Amino acid sequence: MMSRFDTIAYNNRLRKVPPEQKVFFSFLLLFIVMLGNRDMQTVIIIWLAVWIVWYARVSWQVYVKALLLVLTFLCVSFPLLIVSIDHSFHISVNSSNISLVITLCFRSIAAWSCLFFLLVTTPFTEFLYTLKRMKVPSIIIELLFLTYRFVFVFARAADELHVAMKARSGGNHWRHAAMLIFQLIQKTWLYYEALSFALRARSFSGEITYVQKEGDVLCKRYLFEAIIGVVMIVLLGVIGGELL
């Protein structure tokens, strides 16, 4: 799934829009999501869906699948805020928390929309370079880079081990799963050591250098639409009488 998102980030219609423009747009909307009310969050969800599916030309099937994955995670997590179990294992439902759960649900989906827009429209290397230009501490950028790198390493190792286990035994016993997890951790560690050796062999100085993509020109059309949309969302919160 992550490799597919990475491919989309390099082949969408917003690829030529400067990464600084997309990063600032996403972070600004994320800030509004954190402070805004439910109406503002709903508008942001719908608006970003238009940007992702219509402007960036990301397949709506990809968007829906990712959204369903998020909704599944929320459906599993939020019942814990409503249902409580006492020491005698008596189950009760706290109806006063239902409004809180709905608010958190809208805020979570809106925040995911901001980050998903950034994920499918901006290659990760350009995102890191933009953070560097924004004077974000190098340690944070390097942690993001290594985390992103090892997501692919972890997924690749898991796929290889699962195929190998199926080919050799075809077992689905829990002991096979435990063996798979152990070998997955072991193989991921070997990939990490190989990466460390490769960096040292290439005279790694302790700072990762990112290549700047040249030729990006400020897109006035998208900039104008983004400004108008943000202003209207803020006005919606002001007219509604509350921003939180």
Image: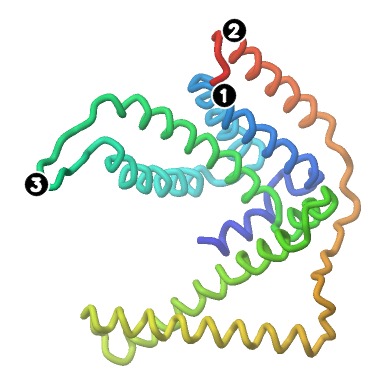
Residue 169 in percent (x, y) is at 27, 90
| Vertical position of residue 39 compared to residue 144: above or below | above
Residue drawn where x is 45% and y is 31% of the image: 106
Residue drawn where x is 65% and y is 69% of the image: 146
Q: Nearer the viewer, residue 243 or 118?
A: 243
For marks 2 and 3, give the one nearer the viewer: 3
Q: Nearer the viewer, residue 50 or 145?
A: 145
- Tag 2 residue: 239
Q: CA distance from mark 2 to mark 3?
A: 48 Å
Q: Nearer the viewer, residue 122 or 76?
A: 76
Where, by quadrant of the figure, is residue 50 drawn? top right
- Tag 3 residue: 88
- Considering only order in the chain, which callout, 1 or 2, is on the residue closer to the N terminus? 1
Q: CA distance from mark 2 to mark 1?
A: 12 Å
- Tag 1 residue: 36
Look at the numbered disc 1 and give the secondary structure of its residue.
loop
Look at the numbered disc 2 and give the secondary structure of its residue.
helix
| Quadrant housing the C terminus | top right
Q: Residue furthest front?
A: 87
Residue drawn where x is 58% and y is 71% of the image: 150
Q: Amino acid at mark 1?
A: Gly
**Mark sitting on residue 181:** none
- Considering only order in the chain, which callout, 1 or 3, is on the residue closer to the N terminus? 1
Dot 3 alpha-carbon crowd within 10 angstroms: few under 14, some 14 to 19, many 20 or more: few
Dot 2 alpha-carbon crowd within 10 angstroms: few under 14, some 14 to 19, many 20 or more: few
Where, by quadrant of the figure, is residue 202 drawn? bottom right
Residue 158 in percent (x, y) is at 44, 77
Residue 220 in percent (x, y) is at 84, 30
